[in-house]
Image (cartoon, rainbow, N blue to C red):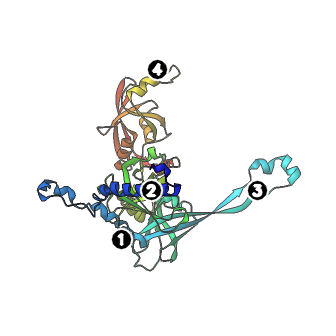
Amino acid sequence: MKFTNFPKSIRQLSTHLLAIIMGVLLGGNTLLVLPSQAEPAPTALVDSSQLVAQKPSNAGAVIGSSSFVTAAVNRVGMAVVRIDTERTVSRRLPEPFTEDPFFRRFFGDLPRNLPPEELRGLGSGFIIDKSGLVLTNAHVVDKADKVTVRLKDGRKFEGKVQGADEVTDLAVVKINAGGDLPVATLGSSSNVQVGDWAIAVGNPLGFDNTVTLGIVSTLKRPSSQVGISSKRLEFIQTDAAINPGNSGGPLLNDRGEVIGINTAIRADAMGIGFAIPIDKAKQISSELQRNGRVAHPFIGIAMDDLTPEQARRINANPNSPIQLPEVKGILVRRVVANSPAAKAGIRIGDVILAIDGKTITKGEELLNIVENSGVGQNLQLKVRRGSRIQQISLRTADMKDFS
């Protein structure tokens, strides 16, 4: 009898049974290799030289009920503060509105002064001394009429800016809390390596006590590359999320030590933030506590890096106002009036080849040498002007006098 002669219901049942039987037969081979069913390998086939590779990885320590991030944050978290600022800005109507007869005809005598505007700011900081010293960014407390420091336990104190330095964007704020405050443990940024863990703590966008995790992406990122050429800094770059409000908060290593101060982000970049190395912050904060300000040496030039290829392109341009030597060095493109460079006779178009016998090819190198020289120090510059090489001596001045 043919299979097609059976009733339809019997044919369907037979088809389902056949499918189940085939599934069991085929699935049996799969079940044999599941971990719970697999036979142990014969001892004779195991190569003891490969056993090292089978040891448990330390990576598992990152994931658990209590990670190194938790330990690091618990170590420093109570020392991280929120900084609220208030600033009153006076406003005036533009003179064309107050003096123009047309407007006065229709609106009468308009008041020159408008009601003052209250501006509020938000940032972060951390306590570096039990007496109540708080380290933060200068731009967090810049021009603030009132500074309020809020601790994680809810207490709040009026803060007084002891000193601020715009060039390095660092400030020290003092609060009177009766002593015995939690203090952040300061590490050393000189030991930081690319790939190290980076933990950012602060109050981004007003979300208090926020923690983000990433790694150190690179070291010694010049502030000129970040887009803030007015600063003299080399940043720690990290992919730990940093947002407005994080400024002034600590960047921690995996042991809960402060390795940097979260400072800057780029509007055109995602997942990139920048922190001031803590070694630089230690140096500047000590000077701010003593003097309230930091003296920065200044020679008075604006400059660009120059390569032979760039010089050839400029020289080939028929509209170029100057012919440059086709060498590698620092091109002077502007000289500040009455500055040390101007008094020493440096001109636009000069190419600085070396300072104090050290060859330089990048602007960051020149800035570092000048910054480390101190105010009132003599520097010997090797300068190429056209086809001639000259030795020029100048004496550094205080940047404050030319701001």
- Residue 109 visible somewhere in the drawing: yes
Query: Are the residues at dot 3 and dot 1 in contact (C-beta closer than 8 Å)?
Result: no
Q: Nearest to the eye among marks 2 and 4: give it.
A: 2
The residue beneath circle 2 is 14
Give the spatial CA distance, label 2 vs label 4.
89 Å
Q: Secondary structure at mark 4?
A: helix
Quarter of the image for residue 259 reads bottom left
From the image, tell me which residue sits under label 1: 66
- Counting other residues with Cα less than 10 Å from the Cα at mark 3, is it few (<14), some (14-19), or many (20 or more)? few
Q: How many marks?
A: 4
Name the residue beneath numbered marker 4.
316
Kindly report which numbered mark, 1 or 4, lies closer to the viewer in this rendering: 1
**Mark 2 to mark 3 CA distance (whole Å):** 97 Å
* Residue at (38% x, 72% y) in the render: 74
- Label 2 Cα neighbours within 10 Å, binned few <14 / some 14-19 / many ≥20: few
Q: Position of residue 339 (x, y in %)?
A: 46, 42
What secondary structure is found at the residue carrying circle 3? loop
265 vs 390, left or right, is right
212 and 107: which one is in front? Answer: 212
Q: Separation of disc 1 and disc 2 at Cα?
A: 57 Å
Name the residue nearer the viewer: 60 or 42.
42
| Image side of residue 175 versus residue 33, left or right | right
Residues at badges 3 and 4 in contact (C-beta under 8 Å)?
no
Q: Is tag 1's residue or tag 4's residue first in the polypeptide sequence? A: 1
**Residue where numbered disc 3 is placed:** 112
The CA span between labels 3 and 1 is 62 Å
Above or below, comparing residue 75 to residue 259 in the picture: below
Judged by depth in the image, the label closer to the viewer, 1 or 2, is 2
Q: Earlier in the sequence, mark 3 or mark 4?
A: 3
Alpha carbon separation for disc pair 3 and 4: 55 Å
Amino acid found under the numbered disc labelled 2: Ser
